[in-house]
Structures are given as structure tokens and as C-alpha cells.
Image (cartoon, rainbow, N blue to C red):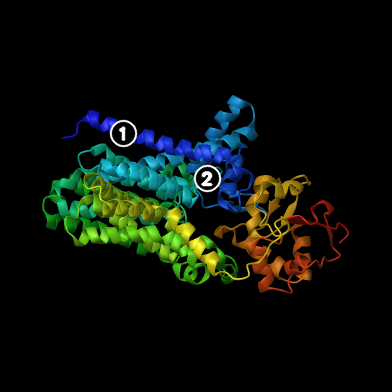
Amino acid sequence: MSTAKDGAATWRSDIALALLAALLLLALNAYAGFPQLANPAGDNDSLLQLVEVRDLLAGQGWFDLHQYRMGLEGGFIMHWSRLLDGPLALGMLAVSALTGSTTLAEQVVQVLWPALLFCLAVFFIIRAARGFAGGHAVLPAAVVGGAALYYIGIFSPGSLDHHNVQMTLTLASLALLLEGPAHRPAALFAGAFATLTLAIGMESAPYAGTLGAVVALLFLGRGDGERLVARDFGLGVAGVSALVFVTTIPMSSWGQAQCDTFSIVQFAVTAIAGAGLAVTASWKVAHATAARRMASLGLLAVVLASVVVFLFPQCLAAPYANLDPRLQQMWLGHIEEAQSIVHLVSDDPARVVARFATPLVAIVLMALRFAHGGWRRQDSFIGALLLVAFLVSAWEVRGSTFSIAFAVIPLSAWIAKWRRRAETDPSSGSVFRMAAAWLISVNSIWSGAAAAASNAFETNPAVKDASIDAPCGSKASFAALGRMPDTTVLAISNLGSPILAFTGHRVFAGPYHRNAAGNLLMLDALIGSAAAARAIVENHHVGLVAVCRGNPESRLFAAKAPDGFLAGLMRGNVPDWLEPVAETRGTALELYRVRSNG
């Protein structure tokens, strides 16, 4: 029988392992010179997150989510939450107070923030593995989990966007729910974390919803055995949803329904779901028998469905259903993380292997566990999350970020099983199976094998000029632009966030669905004729045109509109109303100044 002292000891050892993994990650990045800071390589979200934090520190209001330097004149309202801007801003303030340098403070936070989240994510993976398969799974969870999180790349230095926070909070909620009914406060925090990850970004809604559904179903099936977990989880959900609503949404917007961010829609659903679950679990009349639990939870489900269907039916549509068809074709259809598995199979089969192999192995392991009987409450949480994440990733590859992380837990249990067998029966067969389990569970091995196979079958690979053909992902690419007087820059959407982060200029386009007007204007200018581009340039007071030949978006536009304005610039056809900026000739980012006399 475990004691509180034993529990504290395991927490300390798990924290030590996670801290060791984070220090190793920091050491590897430090040895390489933190290349991601100098070369963000198209991490648009992290760069724009940095811009938003700067704007907040410069005095922009907490409730004011406008991005004034992107889009048409006046900017547009971003759909991100201030919940992430707050701690980042406080971190930068603290470091700048100690060092006296705002620039250094930004760099320190860009390194330490993702490292801290990596440490926490590894820790919660370890805790989840311990709760799922016992102490023997801890070491495999630390090794395989650390490797998996490193591979998916969302914890690299400079990664300030919300994906790593959502991952960490989801893993925390999962690990706490695996603690079991004996650890009552754990479920309260699990509900709070599940709601926070939803409030930060709607892409985590499938996982927060899955955790809540499993809690409710376990309560339905097991009654008093899960009653306190259901009650506390519901209280955590309802309480945090109310707190988030009043602290991140101005009173003037409380009645405005937004489907892509936390608003009255999400608050109504989470508050009713959480409070309803807590009341059902607390009121004996509602949960005394299985039939009463089914009736109470069924009524709650009907109420939730009615609220969405009758009050917020617009949120039942596909996320980008109302996006302009041109943007769907020319922009959304070419965002890598939004591609389905069907597109990946034909376009990049090696990436399919790299992204889907370990989750698929983990699903097979869970299916075998189910087939052999003995299904436990822990299996319900892991199995449901893994399956939902895999289905999401089949629809949009971005879901594989979560499925790869969730897969670590059953894979760690599998490795632990063969490690124990190898210890008790050190035969060549058991050792071989243990080694195979280790290798199969490491995602980067699948990635490397897939890349090697892809290269082996590739014939006549194109040789590229690294200076001219670069995608303009480095900070140095924007140095010349940053030295020029602030103006409006006409550029592709992939350059929008870097221009805002590295210069004082403003842009029309950025890869954000709420900026439809700015993105359409950019499309009209770049794929239209030079005369159409000139009219847009004059009407919107554009001072500079930026061209990055090596960026995939530039190549896409040139291929779709070979007679368009951008394609002509890429071929060297410069209209007389533009003049090349001499110092950028032959560089990755070429600049053209609009002549004042037209």
C-alpha cells in the first residue's frame, strides 16, 4: 500500500527526470547557438505572438486584440486569447528589470518559456505513464516522451505561440485524471486545465471535450466510484470558464458570439456542462441509480445540444466555411498543417510515416489490450484521447502533434513490459523484443527512415541556390527592410508576421483567417496585372514591395498566375513605377521602392 511519503518521493523523482530532459534540450540548443532565434523559419504564429506581447507592453489595452499593423487600414481583431500574452509580458518585464535590456529580455523569455513548458510536458507524460502502467514505465516515458516532444518542434527556442501551452495543459489534465478517485483535488485541477486549454485556442476543443465525456461516462457506469471525480472536474470546468470569461472579454462583448475564440458560446457550453455534471454528482436524487444517472446526464446532453443548435447554430458549420473561395484555394488549401491525410499520402508519403506511425502503433496496442479484456478507467482516458487525436490528424495533420504525444503513454507501457521480461528472462529473444519496442516507439526513427526511403527513390533532385532560393526565414533577411523608414509593405502572407516582428512597417497580409480583407487585397495585387497592382499601391499608400523568390507561397502565386504582377517581378520585369533597392539585389528578400512620381 502506497503512502503519502511514497507519493511525494515519486513526484520528486519524476520532476528530476523532467528537469534533466529540459536541461538536455537547453544544452543541445545552446551548443547549436539557438539557431531558431536567428532563423525562425516561417514560425509565423510565434512571431506574431511576440508582436502582440510587445504591443501589450507598449500600452495597448488588455481587451484590445486589434493587430493594427496588419490588414487594411485600421487593422483587424485577432482571435487569440490574452491568457498567453500575460505571462509572456510579465516574464519580459521581470528580465528587463534585472538586465536593463528589453532586447535581451525578449531573447531570454524566448529560450526559457518553451524550455519550462517542455519540462512540464515531460513531467506530465511521466506522471500519466506512471498512472497508466506503474513505475517501470517512467524511464521509457521520459526518453520516448522527450524525444517525441523534441521531434514535433513546438518546444523549440522562440516557440511562443499557444500550441505548446495547450499541449502541456492537456497532458496535465490527463495525468491528473489518471491519479484516480483517491486523489480528489486532482480532478478539480484537471477540469481547470482542460478549460484553460480550450480558452487559449479552439483547436484543443476535441481533447478537452473528450476528457469531459470520459469523466461523465465513467460516472455513468461506475456511480459512486467516480462521483467525486465527476463533481470536482465539473466544478473546475465551470469555475474557470466563468473566470476566463470575465477577465478576457470586455463587458461590451459579453453578448457577442464568436465561434473561433472563447466567447459567450464557449462559456455557455462549458459553464452548463461543468455545473450540470457537478450538480448531478452532488445531488443524490440525480445519481442514486444507473437509470437516474443516465436520465440526468442525458438531460444535460440535450440541454447542451439545444443551446448550440438553437442559440448558436452558426458554430455548427465547418471552421472555414465562410472563408472566401479564393482564399480557400490559394491560401488555406496550401497550409501544411491544415492538410488531410489523403493529401499527404499523395504529396508527401514520407511525412505520413513520420507523423502517423507511432500513434497507429499505440492504437493497435490499445486495441489488443481491449481485446484481451481487463479494460480499466485509465485505458478509457488514454484510448479515447488517442483515437480522437488520430481522427483529428487524419482530417488536419496538425492533430498529429497531440496524437504523437498521447501515443507515448501506451508505448512506454509496452517498452516497460518487455524490459521486465528481459530482466526476468534475459534470453536473446526477449532482449531483441525489448530493443525492437524501444526503436519502434521513437518517432524520430520513423521520420529518419521515411526520409531516407524518400531520398532513395527521388531522381534528379533539383539543385538550389541557397542565397537566392531561400524562403526568407532568417532574421537577417529583414535587416535591410528594417533600416528603411516605416511604410506599408506589399508582400505575401508568409512574410507578414516576420515583417511586423523584425521591422516597424505594416503589411496587408498574414496567414490568419480573420484578416480576409487584407489577404484578398494582397492576392488582387500580386496575382493580378501590374496595372491592378499599381492602383492598389497608390490607393493604399504602399511604399515598398517585398519579393521572396524561394518562398513556397511566391512560387505558388507565380505558377497560378504566370502573367501576374508577382510572377513578372520574379522574372525580372520591373515596371517603371518601381525601382529596385540596390542593396537587396541578389539577396533572399528583394525590395522595390515605389517611385514618388509614379
Q: Which residue is mark 1?
A: 11
Q: Which mark is residue 156?
A: 2
Q: Is residue 40 above or below residue 2?
A: below
* Residue toward you, 418 or 265: 418
Quarter of the image where the N terminus is located: top left
Q: Is residue 484 left or right of residue 415?
A: right
Question: Which residue: 86% across, 65% down?
Answer: 576
Q: Is residue 422 left or right of residue 575?
A: left
Q: Quadrant of residue 54?
A: top right
Q: Residue 264: x percent and y percent? A: 41, 52
Question: Which residue: 81% across, 68% down?
Answer: 573
Q: Residues within 10 Å of mark 1 (few under 14, many from 20)?
A: some
Q: Residue 229: x percent and y percent? A: 23, 44
Q: Is residue 39 left or right of residue 197?
A: right
Question: Which residue: 32% across, 47% down?
Answer: 174
Q: Reading the chain from its start, which is encountered first: label 2 or label 1?
A: 1
Q: Secondary structure at mark 1?
A: helix
Q: Secondary structure at mark 2?
A: loop
Residue reaching furthest front?
Answer: 428
Q: Is residue 224 above or below residue 586?
A: above
Structural distance between the alpha carbons of marks 2 and 1 = 25 Å
* Residue toward you, 200 or 61: 200
Q: Is residue 423 above or below residue 520?
A: above
* Residue toward you, 94 or 349: 349
* Residue toward you, 412 or 305: 412
Q: Residue 593: x percent and y percent? A: 81, 56
* Whether residue 99 can be seen here: yes
Three-letter code, disc 2:
Ser
Q: Residues within 10 Å of mark 2 (few under 14, many from 20)?
A: many
Q: Residue 134: x percent and y percent? A: 25, 43
